[in-house]
Amino acid sequence: MRKLSETRAAVAMILIAATGWGVIGAFSRPLTAAGLSAFQVTFIRSAITLVGMGALLAVKDRALFRIRWRDIWMFLGTGLISIVFFNVCYFLTIDRTTLSTASILLYTAPCFVMLMSALFFRERITAQKLAALVLAFAGCMLVSGFAGGEISAAALLTGVGSGLGYASYSIFGKVALRKYDTFTLIFYTFLVSTVGLLPFARPAGIAAALTSGAGSLFSALGLGLISTFMPYILYTSGLRSVEAGKASVLAFVEPMVATLAGVVLFGEALSLKAVAGIALIFVAIVLLNVPLGRRVRG
């Protein structure tokens, strides 16, 4: 019973994390409008999360800063591959094709997670998981307004690369959590990613944009704390009690929330296809969390 309650709590944390990622547009758009590049926006996310996590560890337990140097590969994986490589590939894909197509290619991630989890963690690929994955992916396509069309080989390569990079956090993170605390993992992930993004950041330009008005500073803090710091703590904590493959499918809540945020915050139109897509994602989440073969008591 205790294990079931822990699993439910972990599922809730992952869903809340995906919600935090889903509202990222509310904070990133004002920063982009202020003249910051996608790399600079990503650097802001990493740097604020690094500072916040460093302060938290200093207060909570300084022993959490300790790692074994032979384990540094785990944090290079989460920082460089899961954060830097993912973002670089995603932004290149956006430049080469439509936003909806880039989003669809990004959400090949759960497929990679499910396959890699079966290979490295011996997680079962069940019919229930596959059905939920298909429903969620179809829902993502509808929500993103994907309409097909030609795509270049370069866009396809970077798009699938973004999905692979996005998926790798669940894999590297799962391995690191066997040895280290959630907070230790997140701190070193964003230390590595912040250093990795520094050559692209142009800090002077960031400083000028953030001091140009209170709105830009508020957006930066929201981006760092609400859409990065909080979600990564919750998602990483959830990985302790939920299979990596299942967690990646639950994260499909992100495009659903992003669509709803666009409607509420920016007055974007909500099409019938988007409503149908949201419904499919919701059904996938329910399917993934309802044990099959059990009768529901009335």
Image (cartoon, rainbow, N blue to C red):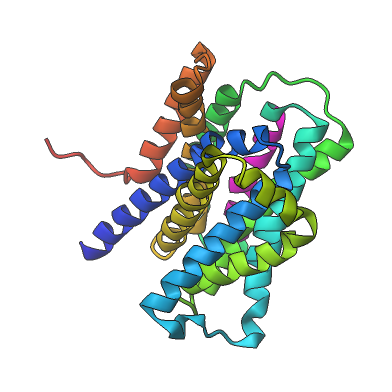
- Percent x, y of residue 108: 65, 42
- In the rendered view, would you say 28 is above or below 148? below
Quadrant where the image shows the N terminus: bottom left
- Percent x, y of residue 13: 37, 52
In the image, 169 versus 209, the foreground residue is 209
Q: Residue at x 60, y 46 (%)?
A: 211
Q: Residue at x 49, y 37 (%)?
A: 23
- Percent x, y of residue 217: 54, 45
Please state the extent of the stretch shown in magenta in the rendering. 101-118
Furthest-right residue in view?
153
Q: Residue at x 44, y 35 (%)?
A: 284
Quadrant where the image shows the C terminus: top left
Residue 120 painted magenta: no
User: As drawn, is 142 to the left or to the right of 264?
Assistant: right
The number of callouts visible is: 0
Tell me the chief SS of the magenta region.
helix
- Percent x, y of residue 251: 49, 44
Residue 112 painted magenta: yes
